[in-house]
Image (cartoon, rainbow, N blue to C red):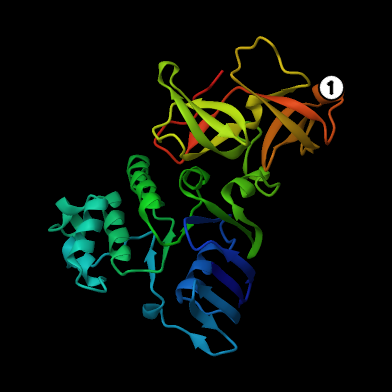
Amino acid sequence: MIQLVFSFSLPNFSIKMNESIPSSGITAIFGRSGAGKTSIINLISGLLTPDSGTIQVGDALLFDAEKGVNLPIEKRQIGYVFQDPRLFPHMTVEKNLKYSQRTGNRNKFNEIVSFLDIEPLLQRYPKDLSGGEKQRVSIGRALLSDPKLLIMDEPTASLDLPRRQELISYLLRLTKNLQIPVLYVSHSLDEILQLADHMLLLDKGKVLANASLEAVWASEHMRPWFSLKEQSSLVMGRIVEHQKEYGLTQMDLEGQCVWVPLHHEEKGAMIRVRIFASDISVVKSRPKDSSIRNIIPVVIDAVLPVPGNAFLCHLILRIVDQTLLANITRWASDELCLCSGMPVFAQIKGVSITKSDISMGKETH
């Protein structure tokens, strides 16, 4: 685990943390401008120093105020990818990459160069690279330092949409192959949705939520970030089979069959899907004849008002250990006498796949 137990103060801003985050996968750090995202990663990397507390990555103690431990940046074994790639302009790509390499391991060099598809760039200079190419080189340079932790501070922020999507495709491959934890700072929920496994949600230096992406996405703290149309749930399931004739994949969601757009992963793989709250309706008994393919039993956890809308309500629906959010009219809720603890059936009109190269928004009726 990565242990972050520290405090840090500036004249008009302070951070207090007592959190653990996984030492594997990608943890997204998200919040409004000024929430403290960059300060936190700079404190971890050693660019800033906490006033008190400890910072530990796995077995490595990076900072301990009481013990007088404060490892210098170069000894923390942290790879840092900035918004601005910060390549040496007078060096070729190959020399930029080798500058940070801790060992002369040619096999590892070739592996990372191949993985990031930057072999054709090796003899070029930074001025001859596109923004996306520069960031791929920057990522390669960070990986060649043999880091125990990789920090990425909004690496797509300065890129246009095509270059951003190109870089995200490489980052998706990165998530499947990296054996080290990644802290990923982003303002983009779409990026986080595609890349992250875990999420740290911040507001004014305070942690509002720290859990799996699915759990944070389902929390009340995330609802203000979405319009009613965009509100959704994330759930995880295992692929059971592919129905290529109809372009569908069957997923096991807590013992229930859910059909999603045809997926490229093999049977047995875990996938994450996004279900929009406006695409879920509920019925008290299962319909006998329906065009909707996904009708699953759930239990109502809560019926909540929608802030600023007197005509709608939120339904929090539980399916074993996962939850769905549905937005229905208050009239329908009153007429059906919906309440906490009631078993109902969720009719799911649309399902989209995340963390894949399949376009989102396809429907499964």
In this view, the residue in front, 89 or 347, is 347
In this view, the residue in front, 139 or 205, is 139
The residue where tag 1 is placed is 336
Q: Residue furthest left?
A: 123
Image coordinates for residue 229, horizontal then vertical, percent: 62, 31
Image coordinates for residue 345, horizontal then vertical, percent: 72, 25
Residue 311 visible in the shown view? no
Q: Amino acid at mark 1?
A: Leu
User: How many dots with numbers?
Assistant: 1
Q: Residue furthest top?
A: 289
For the point 84% across and 22% down, the residue is 336
Query: Is 247 located above or below residue 181 in the figure?
Result: above
Image coordinates for residue 86, horizontal then vertical, percent: 31, 65
Quadrant containing the C terminus in the rendered view = top right
For the point 32% across and 65% down, the residue is 142
Identify the element where label 1 is drawn: helix
Query: Is 278 located above or below residue 61 in the figure?
Result: above
For the point 14% across and 57% down, the residue is 124
